[in-house]
Every structure is written in structure tokens, then in C-alpha cells.
Image: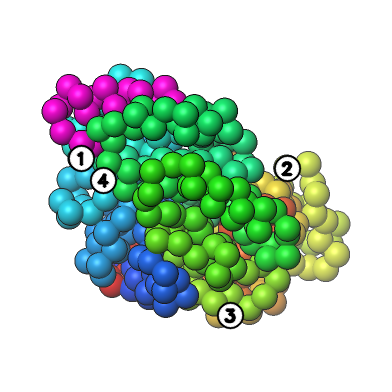
Amino acid sequence: MTGMADTTAGAVLEVDLGAIVANWRALGARHPSGPVAGVVKADAYGLGAAAVAPALADAGCRHFFVALPDEALALRPILPAEAMLAVLGGLFPGTEAAFLAHDITPVLNTLAEIDSWAAAARRAGRALDAILHVDTGMSRLGLDPPALAALRADPGRLAGIAVRYVMTHLVSSEIPGDPINAAQARRFAAACAGLPPAPRSLANSSGIFLGGAAASDLARPGAALYGVNPLPGQASPMRAVVRLRARVLAVRAIAPGDTVGYNATFTATRPSRIATVAIGYADGWRRALSNRFSARFDAAPVPLVGRVSMDLTTFDATEHPGIVPGAWLDLIGPGCDVDDVAAAAGTNGYEVLTALGARVRRVYRPA
Ligand SMILES: *Cc1c(COP(=O)(O)O)cnc(C)c1O
């Protein structure tokens, strides 16, 4: 966990693979209607798919989702051959041979993609796995009502396609009372009734906690695996997964009236000690946190003062004589979890994690 990371890195993201596996198992217990996939797009939400996906596979996970063909090509060699690896972004034109050669499952979002995959199956002389995505309210990807009507009228268009799952994606699953959840479940059931029978995939992280209406043959959580709270406003049912620490580069004494950082947005009102820490917005440590967040040192709050700049962030260390050059502040961890950082930055935990940049050293606690 330490070593060179503590010597040469400015910020370190410690990822607890055992906690990810524990979260995956806990989600499985909440979704008895079918298995739970691992959504590992965007480098496993910034945590590092090359470490996260094999840890989930070792625990028994056999369904993985990424967003892009490039992500799938990188992961396929390190996943078990029998694991399904599906690309949510669809079958990009011209990628049929790559999907086939690397046993990557396309999520078919349009009639054109269905036609291309059926043609690839004819050329290959065998049925090819795919997932059909139905749009039930997101208006982003997935078969729309005219496309579904065309398939109902001409089911032969799916000839050669082995539909592993029909899926849809929930719009507001983190808001259990939103009537759109039930409306989507109804639209999904109606769409499936017009398609050849196939297993269904519905819930994302928060959807799993909706229970019955969102239960399906395959859940697709991402965020909750990584410790983002799937039940905003309630105590999180998930284990914390990450700890983000950053190194104190310098500590200086300033006088009342002195200002800190770009545009002088913080003015000391007392003799103060300012700690300058090696993380900034270039690392995905968001500028919106300026003057709005407290890190932790020995579990005690340390206010962020002044503007977050590209490589540096400043904290008021006046109350903490232990904060000296070479010390480390906790930016995400107990007392300031990923959802707290998100709230202070005016965003969600997904964006906080996926924003963390390549300069932040990832270190892994084994599962
Ligand atoms: C990202 C994504 C998921 C995972 O969502 P979480 O809210 O992170 O659990 C599931 N399904 C689709 C289609 C997605 O794009």
C-alpha cells in the first residue's frame, strides 16, 4: 500500500478490492431474481478496471459491461473466457470482425446495428450473442418505439442473433418515489412481449434497491460496487472502497489580512498556518470545492481555503500542529466520503470518482 507511492506521488488513491467484492456480494443478496454483473466502464469508474474486473471475476462475476469497444479490447484478455463482456455503446460501424474475433458481446441499440450483426452471423455461419437495448424513457441509446414496431412486424430480422438479454436503463432509480420507475417497468414489459422470449436485464445500482419492479435476470450495478451510496439521503448500505490522500508540500504562517490563492478568495482573520497540498483540478480534484470542503487529518476536519488550482490545494492547518511538510491529508475517506465530496462540489459521486486523473497513483488492497 505504501512504498514508492508515498515517495514520488503527490496523491494516492487506495482501492480496497475486498470491499468491492463485498459490495458485489451484498448487491447479489439484494437481487435474488438473477445474477449481478460488474459495470466496469470508464476504467471501473476511475478505480482501475485492470485490477477491479479480475477481482470481480475471481469472486465469481461472469457478466461485465463497458461503454466502448476500446475498453472491451483492453479487458478481454484478462477476463475468463466464459465471462460475457458487453459494450453498452453499441456495435460501431466496421467493428463487427473485432467483436467476433475477441468474443465481445454488442449491445444492439438500433435496427442498423441489428442488421449488421445479423449479416455478420450469416457470414460466420453461426448464431452470434448480443444484448438488445430497449429505450423506455432515457432517449439516449436503445431501440425506440418505431424500431420495436419494425421488429414485431419482421422478427426474421433477428435471425442469427442469439439474444442473451433484453435490457433497458432506468432514468431516476435513485428516487424511489419517482413514478417514472414504474412507467419504465411497464414499457419494458410491453416491449419484451413484442420480442422473442429472452432473459431481461433492468436494474443499475439504485435500481437493485427498488426491489420487485426492477428485479430481473441480470442486474447491472456500477457505482454501488465502488462505494457510491445508491440511496441518496439515507445511510449508505455499501462499504467504502476508496481512500484518497494527498501530500503536504509546504506549510507557511500568514498574518490576519493575508490572502490565499488565485483571486484572493480567502482572507485570514487570525494568525494562520496554510498547508499546500499536491493535488488540483488537473487531477480531477474539482475547482468547485474552493472554500467549500474539509479534508481530514487524524480524523479531524481541515478546511480547504482559497481556490483549488491546477496542481495545488490549500488548507487551513492552524488547528493542527501535526500537519507539516511530508504529512498526508485525507481527501476521501472516513468523515469525508465520496458522496460528501460530491455534495460540496455540487455533483455526484460518479463524477468525483471518474474525474480522478492519471496523476493520482492507484494502489490496491488485495481482495
Ligand atoms: C453506467 C450504466 C449502468 C451502471 O449504472 P450505476 O448507476 O453506476 O449502477 C448500468 N446500465 C447502463 C446502461 C449504464 O450505462
Query: Which label belongs to residue 103?
Result: 1
Q: Marks 1 and 4: in contact by CB < 8 Å?
A: no
Three-letter code for the amino acid on which mark 3 is drawn: Ala
Residue at 26% of width from left, 45% of height from top?
A: 75
Q: Earlier in the sequence, mark 1 or mark 2?
A: 1
Figure quadrant of residue 276: bottom right
Q: Position of residue 104 (x, y in %)?
A: 26, 40
How far apart in space, not on screen, are marks 4 and 2 (Cα)?
42 Å
Helix, strand or loop under label 1 = loop
Nearer to us: label 4 or label 1: 1
Q: Earlier in the sequence, mark 4 or mark 3?
A: 4
Q: Which residues are magenta?
A: 110-128
Residue 74 falls left or right of residue 204: left
* Type of secondary structure dominating the magenta stretch: helix
Query: Which label belongs to residue 262?
Result: 2
Nearer to us: label 1 or label 3: 1
Three-letter code for the amino acid on which mark 4 is drawn: Leu
Helix, strand or loop under label 4 = helix
